[in-house]
Amino acid sequence: MSNPNASGWKPEMTPSEDGLHNGPATVTGNRALMLEEPLLFEIGQLDETGVDLPEPRSDAPNRLGGFDRTDAIGLPALKEGEAVRHYTRLSRQNYAIDLGLFPLGSCTMKHNPRLNEKVARMPGFADVHPLQPTSTVGGALEVINELAHWLIELTGMHGVAMSPKAGAHGELCGILCIRAAHEARGDAREVILVPESAHGTNPATAAFAGYKVENIPATAEGRVDLEALKARLGPDVAGVMITNPNTCGLFERDMKAISDAVHAAGGYVYCDGANFNAIVGKVRPGDLGVDAMHINLHKTFSTPHGGGGPGSGPVVLSEALSPFGPLPFTAKTADGVVHLVEEENAAEFAHTQAFGRMTAFHGQMGMFTRALTYILSHGADGLKQVAEDAVLNANYILRSLEDLLDAPFGASGPCMHEALFSDAGFEGGLSTLDLAKGLIDEGYHPMTVYFPLVVHGAMLVEPTETESRHSLDQFIAAFRNVAERAKAGDEALKQAPYYAPRRRLDETQAARKPVLAWSDAE
Ligand SMILES: *Cc1c(COP(=O)(O)O)cnc(C)c1O
């Protein structure tokens, strides 16, 4: 297949008032060192390969019961060198925490310390295989057990399921524990209450686990309405899912009262712990009556996100829910040996009510090594400072922008680890989306937009504790500049971004009519 330029495709010119970016179209579509990269489908060849595989044999013994490949796969491929370039070029069009401040609220995009990486790459950790005999992986089991111990200590809980592979997976694990606990006492219930401001994964999890989801309203100051919650509790309510600190960046001060009311009505309290970064070392959710809470190791404990991931979402459990936690898990006996508790030996460890398993194996070993490295290198005092600095940085942003931007809960007192703004007061039909696109031109990944849903045109900014004063000041200056343009109704902002590899995309069209390969576009 050909260079996309040959089929009439031309890179868009970037209009610019100073003329700096206006120039002749290039043959390659590249603009200096900003390299264009076509899709693999456009540049790949069906008969190309980067590795040498044996030719498929039509007379091959049918080992896989009819699934053996007998002819070509039909996927486009590249030679090794070209494959490396393809992905390296694409990676240069990506934004990453190693390039700059990544203010995605709720996501806690903090620096990934290189010490974590160094330890995770030690062959004894990096090369273990989940099917190795348990007797050969004592060190790995020690790491899992030690991390489990820290998570239990930091949260003041009773047990922990280490195997869930992300926050949402942890939510499912916690809700399945709640269901198992109700079923064990013959009290099947059908409703889970979720605040209006919840992350979309909360209602999705409850629905996936077979519950009906009902909303709890928020008060004018952005917290769960305790009285409305109490009024709804009853024998059909299995539990609540509450995020604390919540997605408006506020601490739920009534958390203990909420837990007491839910327990008195025979329900359980699930806490979405995605925002644990704001309170780690300061508040123990167990003391607030929480029964289950996931911890995103890729948020609070500095392991990489997204493409650099994978995620990991251990779930801490109260004494009431621990008996129902999934297999496998680690347990240390009096002789100091760490055991892996599986179906075969669950009875020896008095764990016979497990609801099942979340994963085939033990969880994200590479993330456990990184998270434990992070915890041990910070220590208890260092982790407390993480929370304090995260909150300090978010308040610095809140107070530096609230003269310019509407801060719906700015008057409720200091925020926790994230600052919430809205687009109230923007002129000329400009909105949150335009400000976000303008930030891209300033070289920043935008903040979280239109979430939480309880605030119209929400912008949720989470700087995290790993940003310096200098980096915060630069970000604030850029943010102020774009916000001033939005408030002045600057028409040009509607076309932003101007300087990104791609101009503004039609998101509706992209969702409704995705073009997944070049040939579809023709
Ligand atoms: C990130 C997040 C989740 C989901 O966690 P994943 O690890 O992305 O599955 C749930 N709730 C909140 C509030 C979050 O910020």
Image (cartoon, grey):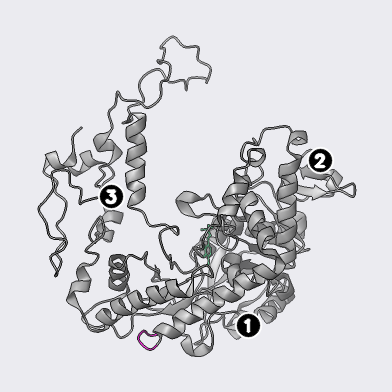
Judging by the rendered image, the residue that carries numbered circle 3 is 514
Which image quadrant for residue 316?
A: bottom right
- Which residue is disc 1 drawn over? 253
Q: Looking at the picture, does residue 364 appear above or below residue 460? A: above
Dominant SS type (magenta): loop
Residue 47 placed where, x, y %?
Answer: 30, 23
Q: Amino acid at mark 2?
A: Asn
Q: Secondary structure at mark 1?
A: loop
- Secondary structure under tag 2 reads loop
Residue at 64% across / 51% down in the picture? 368
The image shows residue 436 at horizontal and vertical percentages of 32, 69
> In this orientation, does residue 214 appear?
yes
Asked if marks 1 and 3 touch (Cβ < 8 Å), the reply is no
Residue 405 part of the magenta-drawn span: yes
The answer to whether the residue bearing label 2 lies less than 8 angstroms from the nearest atom of ligand 1 is no
- Is 228 positioned to the left or the right of 475 in the image? right
| Nearer the observer, 216 or 368 | 368
